[in-house]
Image (spheres, coloured by chain):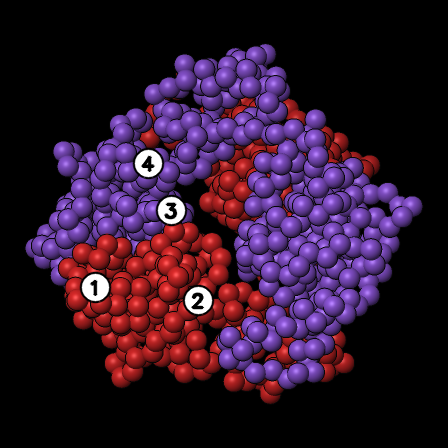
Chain colours: A red, B purple
Amino acid sequence: MSIRAGIVVTGTEVLTGRIADANGPWLAEQLRTLGVDVGHVVVVGDRPDDLLAALRFLTGTGVPLVITTGGLGPTADDLTAEIVGLFQGRPASLDPDLEQRIGAVVERLMALRGWRADAESTAAGVRKQAQVPVGATVLEPVGTAPGLVVPPAAGRSGPVVLVLPGPPGELRGMWPAAVAAAPVADLLTGAPELRQETVRLWGTLEAQLAATLRDHDAELAGLEITTCLREGELEIVTRFEPDAQPAYDRLLAALTEAHGDTVFSTGPDLDAVVAGALVERGLTIATAESCTGGLLAGRLSARPGSSDYLLGGVTAYANSAKEALLGVPADLLASHGAVSAEVARALAEGARARFGADVGVGITGVAGPGGGTEEKPVGTVHLCVVGPEERLERALRLRGSRSMVRDRSVTMALHLVRQLLLGGPPA
Amino acid sequence: MSIRAGIVVTGTEVLTGRIADANGPWLAEQLRTLGVDVGHVVVVGDRPDDLLAALRFLTGTGVPLVITTGGLGPTADDLTAEIVGLFQGRPASLDPDLEQRIGAVVERLMALRGWRADAESTAAGVRKQAQVPVGATVLEPVGTAPGLVVPPAAGRSGPVVLVLPGPPGELRGMWPAAVAAAPVADLLTGAPELRQETVRLWGTLEAQLAATLRDHDAELAGLEITTCLREGELEIVTRFEPDAQPAYDRLLAALTEAHGDTVFSTGPDLDAVVAGALVERGLTIATAESCTGGLLAGRLSARPGSSDYLLGGVTAYANSAKEALLGVPADLLASHGAVSAEVARALAEGARARFGADVGVGITGVAGPGGGTEEKPVGTVHLCVVGPEERLERALRLRGSRSMVRDRSVTMALHLVRQLLLGGPPA
């Protein structure tokens, strides 16, 4: 049996959506590879009572490990260390050595940025960050905040609470030390591996998949199957302990038999599939984007090593830029309009020619909320991919907000590239 | 007193980070404008017991309203409607009219995409989505899933549970009907407005701010102040009910007095500040990006109406593209290397010239994880912004992952544009 854990993400900025939480999911995935299954992620604001309630809730679910992120800064609203200490029956006190080490970090940071600060206020902040619940293990700061491993006080029961900082870079930098700290390492000993496999379909409805899963239900014991519809893609993720591998093999066979013509990946995501195909075939790619404004190039360049295939791209927002930088003929723009299949084609061909790439991608559309007409409403997008031998085109009518239209257009363009390079289900 | 609410986000795909939750924060912000304060967002996987535990926890916090998102699809792992019905003492049964309406939507969707499906499996999925807890109010589907308003059964106490679909487009489309539905509308009646104001600093340390807040603590009753350090920016968000407005005015005066030289906004975020400055001054902008691969252009084009100032950009990954599309001299690339202050300047000037823009931005750097050298390690980034009268440059040594280096470079470039256009704290 795998171990379970709960996560508390603190910070009013996360709760109110000003910052998207990157830590909960990252921790859940790290824990999975260690055989630890996360049941709940609770996001709370910077309020003592709400944080206490979250700790009580997760303790009540019976998990042996709770991880908190955030709330370790020098301001008064950062109260995680204090509250966790209170919860575990371990009041905090100043750790003078730690205070010195944090002070040195803060000084170095200020010098680096050329910022000036009042010595007294800096010292007060440092002193706050050096408060440690008695008996807790200190994890050395990666930024200015130390992490903490806080077991329940002697005579109490409950989970070990691992307290980590909020900035993702600091949290990730501290993770190896956190899992190596004795109270955490002891918990993890003996947890079995938790496998996770993904199958991706394009062109199968969720209802059809549901029928396939129902038909094979009896053969799939030991698998936790979740399906998720994402921008038209049906993603099937299965988690299982090693002894259920034969059941997973049966699932994969059933999916291939029922929906093989729509399976475009049994692992890597769309971006990785496209990158793999470009590398495999030794092809280069370049983009010409209007409504997506560089997001396709941004996504193609997100992977390490992408300079092996991505030569570059042009964001041509103004028509003058489409003409000057991509050679789109002025009369084509005048006669068909910037949002047209003809211009998408000229963009793709322009990108291919100007960058000397094997594959060119053109995107033009109306992302909204303004700019729509009766003939070309918001959400109208034309895509074109031109390769060495073939050209594929697609006209879309997308729904949703400006950012949804832009993101979805990029995804559809990547599916079109995938289809051009690999065949498989049509975009 | 404002009303409080809790949110449950369901879906193993969210819990494990395969999909970032966009709904919890969006709902929290919508609720705030209605005078409803969210204390906890709980993310749970597709497991009945975990969902029940989350509902029990939020009910235990005493909130009169709980909102769930996700888990309304046709597959067996989608179980929110059933579990919420169970929790509220309202068993589900088939709503035949709703079944017909959903069936029509599914048919139309399939026809639109040209997908074929087995009629029986489609019908089974539709039938599952048309199960409604007895006595619940149905919110018409925006996609295929209906929403539900589920009060506790007669004789029971507890919160009204509002059940909404997971896809953000569907959830947002359904929101107006959800808040208008009687059991929700009744709750919201009389909730006072909850104000939220933001001050953004660049160049003040969190510890300095903490000292300022401590000094003025006695004058700030009624304010919930949270501070958040984000990519070097110190963001101070204050929430308060209308009668605490004078306290907020005192806070703003104190911040301005202590840190006025680092305040770059008392409201809009950096992107909005830059966009506003461009519009105000009637200037256009163009970008030339290497390591950020189009993300700056993507961010500049994210706002509606951005075509008023953004002419476009070039992502020049390959050196050949830097030469051909932006006129960076080959000997400059050879003598200084692509990652250099000289090339950043040539990129900015190239973007300005090729697009005929008033402002040109150049970014070149080593995003990693590979490609670093002793002289130019991963995280080395050169920025240049060229305007009508002035040129600003900045050399960075950033830490963190590839995506962190890229995102931070884009933010720093925007700060440099802000400084060029508006002065204020140096980037």
**From this viewpoint, is residue A146 visible?**
no
Q: Are marks 2 and 4 on the same chain?
A: no
Please report, as a chain letter, where disc 1 is located. Answer: A
Q: Which residue type carries mark 1?
A: Ala
Q: Which residue type carries mark 3?
A: Arg
Kindly report which numbered mark, 2 or 1, lies closer to the viewer in this rendering: 1
Q: Residue at x 64, y 24 (%)?
A: A93
Q: Residue furthest front?
A: A374
Q: Residue furthest bottom?
A: A257
Q: Is residue B393 left or right of residue B72?
A: left
Question: Quick one: quadrant of the N terminus of chain A?
Answer: bottom right
Where does the image place residue B396, in percent across and percent down from the top left? Answer: 29, 41
Please report, as a chain letter, where disc 4 is located. Answer: B
Q: Residue at x 77, y 70 (%)?
A: B96
Q: What crowding class fits label 4: few (fewer than 14 Cα within 10 Å), some (14-19), or many (20 or more)?
A: some
Q: Nearer the viewer, residue B262 or B331?
A: B262
Instruction: Say which residue label 1 marks.
Output: A334
